[in-house]
Amino acid sequence: MLEVILTYPTDEGSREIALEDGKVSFGRGSEADYRFDDDGLSRLHATIHREGDNVWILDENSTNGSFVNGEPVSPNGTVLYNGDKIKIGHYTTLSIKISSKQSSQQTNNSDEKAKTVAASGADSQGFPLLIPLALVGFALLVISISAVLIGVKVLGNDEPEIVQETPYEDYPTETPDNRNDNKNSNKTPKPSASTDNSPVTPGNTETIENKTVEVTNSGTTVVLPKGKYQDMSENDKNTYIAVKAEKIARIIGNQKSDPIPPEAVKEIKMYVNGYASRLNKAKKDSCEQSGWISSDFTSVLNRATKTSPLVVRSFLTEGIRAEIGIYVAMIEGEHCPCLTSNTGAKGMFQFLASSWGDYDADKNPNDRCNPEKSAAAGAKYLKSLIARYGTAPDSVPLAIASFNSGQGNLSQNLDKVLAGAAGQNRSFWTLAANKNLMQGGAGKQFSGENIKYVPKFFATAIIGENPQDFGVNLQPLSTYTK
């Protein structure tokens, strides 16, 4: 567990705030946990949140804004790191220190040991210190003799002996490249550096020696299976889904991601397979109430290339990753501009007339069928949900789930599960694994519908961001900006 300390200056010197799980607020008014005499502060100016080892700041719609290292805080929050400087108001500054309690204790213990050794050396007139010095001298002598012998061997040969070792790493799944290898049949060569010497960083997809390489959040390099997803073996599909799902989680989680549980990967794969099977259907591009869901999925992806630019523009305006909006719209209405459900919800984001006015300035419910206005309203609503549930890696999927279930239902289910499953992560995957703890209508709604929502989001995002891996000649939907 990390130790998080906020430091701020006062007339009497600096003071510290130890930040535990939860949030603390800052401002000028009585609603703030910490109040400062700074006329540039709003009554409730900013909040700093912590979930485990994840820490972030939200600006609470202040007049003068909040800044981290001179940069404005993102509308959906900014992740904080050790050494960051926060400025709020005209002159109020906060410094953040994030460190490991264990590391600090080990450092202190090491210092004590060093003092003990020094003291013992002085008490015994320095003789214990002579022993390691003698050993160092002997080691240097051995190294010098070895160097001379190696030089004689090399100079005595007409040609230098070159030993080339091909590095291998264990790789648990069978790939087309190693399936027929007699030697090293269960290993895959480590990819060499790319020809332009650019680093392969977490989240990147590189093509190295005609192989697709992904680097996971932990820094592990994974060589993905070749060929179309539909033609892969089941083991290869499992590897592909696990790696791509983690990448989507990083994209929506401020480039960080906690591991996705194997059970969740299995659920995501089930929906990927379902959507992939619709790619082979006869062309039927229909947004009718009774027929839209039977559209072939190639037509759905092509439809999304026309509406995604509107979503990208609206979500970036609100400071939110565009991929969140693109794939919420995909599972809400498959990018049909005026889909009307049996409940009366309309448009790409399926707004009810009663809630439309909260997110559209004109408050005209007929505008729900306007793709541009629908995208703008969807961005505003999801921004409010992300602000409620946080920007930590596991928090954004909760916001996505609450788009489907409503904030009240999700919060009620979350409280019950975390109370009954103490110590587990505050995440959608924890909800899914403990759905038996939920009660009443909110629990029934989760088990019957909401439990499918986030896996469907990941499934459509995997296909939509990698259409060519599924045999569809399109670019990733998030790249369509005009």
Image (tube, helix red, strand yellow):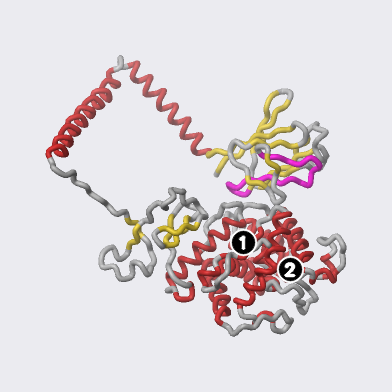
Residue ID at (30%, 71%): 180
Q: Nearer the viewer, mark 1 or mark 2?
A: 1
Which is more toward the observer, 462 or 478?
Answer: 478
Relative image position of residue 320 (x, y in whole percent) = 68, 55
In the rendered structure, the answer to whether residue 438 lies left or right of residue 178 reads right
Residue 337 in which image quadrant = bottom right
Inspect this view and state whether residue 416 appears: no
Residue 193 got which mark? none
**Residue 11 appears in the figure:** yes
Q: Residue at x 50, y 39 (%)?
A: 102
The residue singled out by tag 1 in the image is 479
Question: Number of labelled discs?
Answer: 2
Does residue 74 appear to the left or right of 3 in the view shown?
right
User: Badge 1 local density, few (<14 within 10 Å), some, or many (20+)?
Assistant: some
Is residue 122 positioned above or below 267 on the image? above
Question: Quadrant where the N terminus lies?
Answer: top right
Residue 359 in the figure: left or right of residue 332: right
Measured Cα–Cα span from mark 1 to mark 2: 20 Å
Q: First in sequence, mark 1 or 2: give its number.
A: 2
Looking at the figure, which quarter contains the C terminus? bottom right
Which percent across, then down, holds residue 238?
Answer: 47, 68
> Which segment did they paint magenta?
51-68
* In magenta stretch: residue 52: yes
x and y percentages locating residue 276 in the rendered image: 55, 76
- What residue is pinned by disc 2? 349
